[in-house]
Image: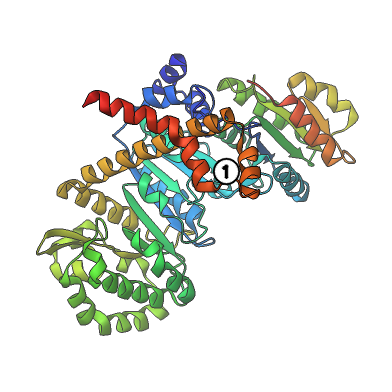
Amino acid sequence: MSTEQEPEQRTIRCLVAKVGLDGHDRGAHVIARAFRDAGFEVIYSGLHKAPDEIVQAAVQEDVDVLGISILSGAHNTLVPKIVEGLKEYGAFEDTLIIVGGIIPEDDRPGLKEEGVAEIFGPGASMQETIDFVRENAHDR
Amino acid sequence: MGELIDDLLDGQHRALARVITKIENRSPGYRDLVRELHQHTGDADVVGITGSPGAGKSTLVDKMAAEYRERGLTVGVIAIDPSSPFTGGAVLGDRIRMASNVGDMDVFFRSMSARGQLGGVSTATTDAVKALDAFGKDKIIVETVGAGQNEIDIVRTADTVAVLVPPSSGDDVQMLKAGILEIGDVFVVNKADLDGADRTVSELKEMIMMRDASPAAGTGGYHGAGTDATDASGHHGPDEGGTAGGGGTDPDPSAEITGPGSAGTPGSTTDQGGPVETDEGEAWVPPVVQTVANTGEGVEGFLETLDGHRNFLERTGQLEAKTRKRYAEEIRRLLREDTRALLERELEAQGGIDAFVEDVMARETDPYTVADEVVQPLRDCLGGRSEDGA
């Protein structure tokens, strides 16, 4: 119907998540703000969240993108738990999962196999990340 | 489409989340979704929470949800945050404070961006509330942006509106006079453990009495308390001072809380707000309650006050009146949206707005004439139909 106004560009919703014991959220704040300025709607999880909480938030908020920021090295334990939870709610298929932070080269293939779309380490530019989200978080 | 609704009615959180997204995005077909939802709505109790930024809305909502869950009720929360007028982007930060309900899917918390809508509550909120209602939530809490005086929209969504006021907010309270004071069914002085809470409570009570005594009160919607309230203010003025002095050393918010239990004693009823008898029947004087949302203190009493208001609305038939008014509003709003879209299309068909602006700039025509011209087909059509009918 023509009476339904179509936004020129659908608003991208994104959950920026901090999981586990890692207490550093500067990076998460920076990315949250950059995403906001890119016109995304950003939900920030806050620090010290359990995988369950991240899944709950991602499902309820129906986000297009789940950005997990991890600096603690626990990614191999935490990311699979989140993926599992998303699958349980049927939300895995259309959630673009990206990971940012300190991820050793050796661990990257494993995470991608789990379902992580891209990993942004130190030195990744903001614009790169935003462009990646724009290109990959679309129609569902 | 039908499947999505079926899944929602079946209790699938994913479907509920997806329906709200479609509503928010005004995705193609969202109207059909809302249409289907309607027949399954009407059972939820909708509470609006508003107040200035930093008043503690999110923390209180968190504790409210936890308390409702304690009582075996399911909860839906919609929290609205502002969006950037430039990029449309937003950081939706209220979820962080939902710590008490972690891992409990029966508290369905959804952040919404105001998406540039004035009034703080996006037009999609009403529809999102319907989705939560149809899903079967017992209590739905709508938390507004808290930007200030233009929070009146929340009244259109909620059965009961609670306005949060931080302590020592003399200036804020002054600000409230013009806008938010009129929409509150219950006032909450949160952070009641801070200095100045008692003063804020008595200031609020005083203003509520003045409001209800003002000539406009009778015409001003659903409150309209009579002269009893004014008298009460006169009687109890000195008492307030006493309470403030005593409370300063040992703040005991629960002592101030108004519950339905106290409604039986007329004296305390007028003092603390709640239903009062007037010449025109039963009226509602907004109670002022105190909470410390951080610790959960006073939250139980606050919820009882909300229930008290709900009961009052049901008992007096005002709930139905409110609902009628709300649907009338909704129909009008949809009509406005639809006609606007029709006229936009007509505008395009007649050559677009820029061309008209050119002509206006050149003094060849003027905005009124343009509007007349563009709306003419619609006028002909509707006018023609009514003549046919006559």
In the image as oriented, which residue stretches furthest toward the front? B364
Q: Residue B218, image x and y in percent?
A: 21, 63
Name the residue at the top extreme.
Answer: B3
Tag 1 residue: B115
Circle 1 marks a residue in which chain? B
In-front residue for pair B389/A91: B389
On the picture, is B308 further left or further right than B175? left
Task: Specify whether residue B93 is in view.
Answer: yes
Q: In this view, does A127 lie to the left or right of B385?
A: right
Is residue B6 positioned above or below B91 on the image?
Answer: above
Question: Could you tell me how many numbered marks the image carries?
Answer: 1
What percent of the width, then of the height, locates residue B188? 38, 63
Residue at left offset 43%, top offset 22%: B32
Instruction: Say what amino acid the circle numbered 1 marks.
Output: Arg
Looking at the image, which is closer to me, B117 or A132?
A: B117
> Residue at 26% of width from left, 85% of height from top?
B238
Residue in view at x 50 percent, y 44 percent: B369
Residue B110 horizontal/vertical position (percent): 51, 39
Quarter of the picture containing the C terminus of chain B is: top left
Q: Quadrant of the rendered structure where residue B297 is?
A: bottom left
Is A63 located above or below residue B167 in the figure? above
Q: Residue at x 24, y 65 (%)?
A: B217
> Tag 1, which secondary structure?
loop
- Residue B312: x and y in percent read 20, 52
Picture quadrant where residue B192 is located: bottom left
